[in-house]
Amino acid sequence: MNASPADPRPLQVRDLRAMKRRGEKISSLTAYDASFGALIDQTGVDAILVGDSLGMVIQGHASTLPVSIADMVYHSRIVSAARRRALVIADMPFASYATQEQALDTAARLLREGSAHMVKLEGPKPGVIRFLTEQGVAVCGHLGLQPQSVHLLGGYKIQGRGETAARRILDDALLIEQAGAECLVLECVPAALGAAVAKQLEIPVIGIGAGPDCDGQVLVLYDMLGISAGAQPRFSKNFLTAAGGIAAAIRHYHEAVKTRQFPGPEHSY
Ligand code: KIV
């Protein structure tokens, strides 16, 4: 498969739903700076997530909680400057969307100053999501493992195990879709639940540790290059070792997602 996209025009938010409808897997990676942003964009990856994981992989914190709105705006701006085709999705950091008004202030900064196309927020917050979409903001939900709630969750653990927990995630996903979200990130849940959520929703479900049947995949760039400190999560894969170079590793990841070779059973729960 040629890594360059067949259609090089800049992607629009609505293209994600069109990709789901035609059964094309969505590839996504995190980036936090212009150089990696450009490399990822040139490879044809569909969405660049300026994740608040930058708190861990860039800033060296033990969690995403210390990341500020100013940090997110800065990293979003420098990634967006390098973007030609991919959609740029920026994370709303911890405690920056507790009310509708606060959420709009944060989203406005990420869109205006950070030039993001979409914002992502964790948890079932249909009221906030509806309000943002009514103001014209494209929103990506985030369910399953929600890193901003790490202390409540008692660690970075698989979520949605067992019938009740799985049902709850499925119900929350529907609420998020009904509230107007454009897509949903689903993190660290059993593959069967990832498949069920993707089947139930019309909006694309982008998995990270949620099995091969999600509509797309996202990984933390530094995990897939094997340069994150600490243990590699089971759901990630080091693409750099086999590829021998960073650009080739990103291309291999993109191709593996598009051709459904990643994630394999060894990366799923
Ligand atoms: O912050 C981030 O990188 C994320 C991904 C783990 C999906 O939210």
Image (spheres, rainbow, N blue to C red):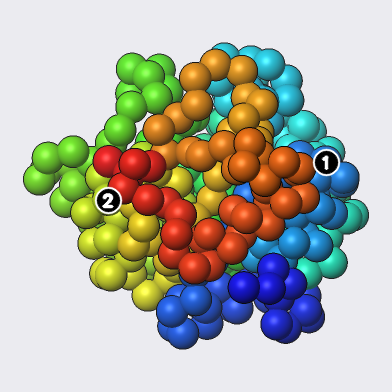
Whole-angstrom CA distance, mark 1 to mark 2, is 31 Å
Residue 201's place in the image compared with 23, above or below, is: above
Residue 48 placement (x, y as % from top left): 68, 54
One can see residue 208 in this view: yes
Could you tell me which quadrant the N terminus lies in? bottom right
Quick check: 180 left or right of 190? right
Could you tell me which quadrant the C terminus lies in? top left
Residue 113 placement (x, y as % from top left): 85, 50
| Residue occupying image coordinates x 36% and y 57% | 212
Quick check: 200 left or right of 22? left
Which amino acid is tagged 2? Ala
Residue 199 placement (x, y as % from top left): 28, 70
Task: Decide: few, some or many residues near mark 1? Use Cα within 10 Å; few <14, some 14-19, many ≥20.
Answer: some
Pointer 2: what residue? 191
Which amino acid is tagged 1? Asp
- Mark 1 or 2, closer to the camera: 2
Quick check: 83 left or right of 265? right
Q: Secondary structure at mark 2?
A: helix
Residue 33's label in the rendered image is 1
| Residue occupying image coordinates x 40% and y 33% | 234
| Residue occupying image coordinates x 10% and y 45% | 163
